Every structure is written in structure tokens, then in C-alpha cells.
Image (cartoon, rainbow, N blue to C red):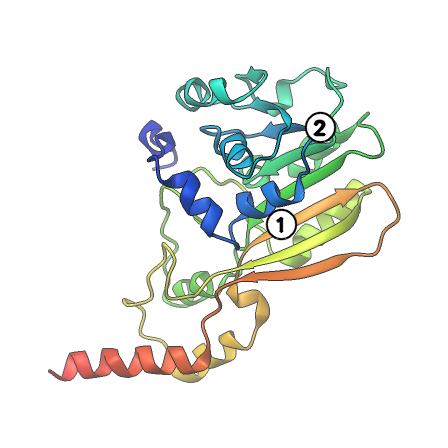
Amino acid sequence: MFTRPDSTFDLPPETVGYVLRDEAGPLHRIAKMIPSGSSVLDVGAGSGLLPRVLHAMNREVVIDGVEPNEHAAAIAAPHYRHLYQSRAEDLPQPLPNRYDFVVLADVIEHVADPLAFLRRLTDGLPRETRIVIDTPNVAFGAVRLALLKGRFDYVDSGILERTHLRFFTLSTLEQLIAELGMNVESLYLLQRDLLKTEMPLHHIQTDGRLMLRLLRDELASTYQFLFVLTREDVATERRTFGERLTPGEYLRWRLARVKTRLR
């Protein structure tokens, strides 16, 4: 129940193309922000998707990876200069190389103590190194609605992925970053249509007025948060990407379901 099957690391060939088309996907946004000539440490490398996306975007970078899963590390290794098969917590400190970006894509939710983990990882990094973190939003509307019905169903990938140890909202992430002593250079709200995720709503009979209230809440449509952190004093850039369910689309969906039941 709480382990991820190795088979979920076996990505189909079309995955890179999907990421390139998905402007609200975290790896799409991360790859776009990293310029050619950068040095990158990809923590939680998985199957090596980030370097493949960077290559497809014609970004010429030097990239190392860290991945604890033996099966995933074997798939990922050809795509990195160095691939460390270990937990990030076990890397030597300070890190053996200088990096412009340290990327933690869907990582901190897997760590028992994210603050201690981030403090150790960032200690001794050059001031100009950017820390890129993305993590799911447990206050996504579909999760809220499922909880109202007493459901919290683990899945192989997504917000409720079965190996997640920590769950975050925007306010808890901001508190974590403040305690880390870093500043937010960029905050991306990566949004999804509530009807088009791994948490289907067709089994949830919910009050229409409640759903319309949710749709007015920007954070209820935010599936993931993406932060770029720096030690520099900067003003935060906040941007939103993705396909958000509108009240009109929801009402049409609800009407179609009613018609189907009446047939």
C-alpha cells in the first residue's frame, strides 16, 4: 500500500512529447527557466525525464542526478554526467560540484523532515545558486471534495501518491521557506481542470453551490506549486499556468450527468 511499484518508473516514449506540450507541467516550466550553459543538480531524478526534456528544448546543460530507487537509477543514468544512486540526505556536504540550479521536483513530500533536509542540502551552496522546488497542493479542490465524502485514496502517482510522507498547502510552504531563510524569486501556480486529474469527481455527489465556491478560489484549482528560491533580496514574481475549470463548464458537465441518469 505504501510502496511505489518499479513499473511506474518505466515511462512510455511519448512522455517527453507530453511534457513539451504541457505548459502547466512542472518539468516543462523548470526546463524553460534553465538557460543553456547552466549546471544543474536534479535531486530525485526518477527515470531521468528532466534531462530528456532539456535536450528536447535544445538546452545544452551539464546535469547530475540523485535517485535512490535502483530500478529508476538504472534507466536514468545514461542521461546524466553523474548519477548518484543514493538518498539526497546521504550526499557529501558540501556538494562536490558547483551548480547554478538545484532542482527538487516532487521531492520534499517524500521526506520525513523537509526543513532539516533542505537546510542540509542548501548549506554551503553559493549565494547565486537557485533552488527549484515543486510539490503538490493538498488543498486542490478534488482532494477537498473527496475528504468531505470521507475519501483519501492513495494512487501510484499524483497528489496522494502512496509514498508521500508530507502534504503541503501554500501557507505551509511559505512557512517552510521562511524558516529555511531563503527568499522566493518566483512562484508558479500550476493549475488543472478539476474534472481532468487522477481523482475523478464522477463518484462524488456534491452540492453545486459548494463547487461554484471552489471554482472562485484560485488555490482550489492549483494542482502544484513551483518555487524558485534564492538568498538574494528580490521581489517575488507570481505567475499562473494551466487549464482551469470554469463555472459554465462545470454546470454543463453537471447537466450532462443528470441527463445520462434520466435515460
Residue 47 x, y percent position in the rendering: 44, 28
Q: In which quarter of the image is residue 133?
A: top right
Count the labels in the image. 2
* Above or below, 50 relative to 175: above
Disc 1 marks a residue whose amino acid type is Leu
Instruction: Check the picture and name the quadrant holding the N terminus.
Output: top left
Q: Is residue 129 left or right of 147 when viewed as pictured? A: right
- Tell me the residue that label 1 is attached to: 226
Q: Can residue 161 be seen in this view?
A: no
Distance from disc 1 to disc 2, alpha carbons, whole Å, reads 18 Å
- Residue ranking furthest to the right: 233
Q: Give the residue type that dot 2 points to.
A: Leu
Q: Which of 259 and 62 is in front in this view?
A: 62
Residue on which the image places disc 2 = 121
- Of labels 1 and 2, the one closer to you: 1
Q: Earlier in the sequence, mark 1 or mark 2?
A: 2
